[in-house]
Amino acid sequence: MANEKFMKTMQPDAELGAVIGNEPVARPTAVKKIWDYIKKNGLQDKVNKRNINADEKLLKVFGGKKQVTMFELAGILGKHLK
């Protein structure tokens, strides 16, 4: 039962959609897409790999925070998926 909820497709809001696209996605797919974006744009902190530095688009997703940890990422994404 819990796995069905986890795999349910959800609609990204405008901020997240600007990063991963506007198609409905399952949560694991959203996480993968945001990591692809982070790696493609070199946003993983060079010193502490657990930190993600925000660019212009991620600043909106992160609620204005310039840096978040990878552990915060899932919770942040949850706020942008409906």
Image (cartoon, helix red, strand yellow):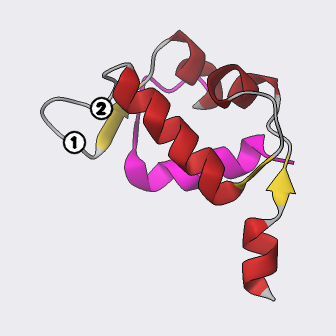
75 is higher (above) or lower (below) than 41: below
Element at label 1: loop
Q: Position of residue 78 (x, y in %)?
A: 70, 52
Name which residue lies at 62% across and 24% down.
Answer: 19
Residue 59 vertical position relative to residue 71 in the rendered view, above or below: above
Alpha-carbon span between mark 2 and mark 1: 6 Å
Residues under numbered marks 2 and 1 in contact, where contact means CB atoms less than 8 Å apart: yes
Residue under the image location 72 percent in, 27 percent down:
21
> Horizontally, is 18 left or right of 54 in the view?
right
Residue count near mark 1 (Cα–Cα under 10 Å), binned few <14, some 14–19, many ≥20? few
Q: Position of residue 43 (x, y in %)?
A: 34, 25
Say what amino acid the circle numbered 1 marks: Lys
Which residue lies under the disc numbered 2? Answer: 44
Residue 79 tag number: none
The residue carrying pointer 2 sits among few (fewer than 14), some (14 to 19) or many (20 or more) residues within 10 Å by Cα, namely: many
Q: Quadrant of the N terminus?
A: bottom right
Instruction: Identify the residue at the far left of this view.
Output: 47
Q: Amino acid at mark 2?
A: Gln
Q: What residue is rendered at 75% in x and 40% in y?
A: 80
Q: Which mark is residue 49?
A: 1
- Quarter assignment of residue 63: top right
Q: Secondary structure at mark 2?
A: loop
Among numbered discs 2 and 1, the one appearing first in the sequence: 2
For this view, does 16 lie left or right of residue 47? Answer: right
Which portion, as a residue range, is magenta? 63-82
Give the mark count.
2
Using residue 49 as the reference point, say whether residue 7 is left or right of it: right
Membership of 59 in magenta stretch: no
As for residue 77 lying within the magenta part, the answer is yes
Q: Is residue 50 above or below residue 36?
A: below
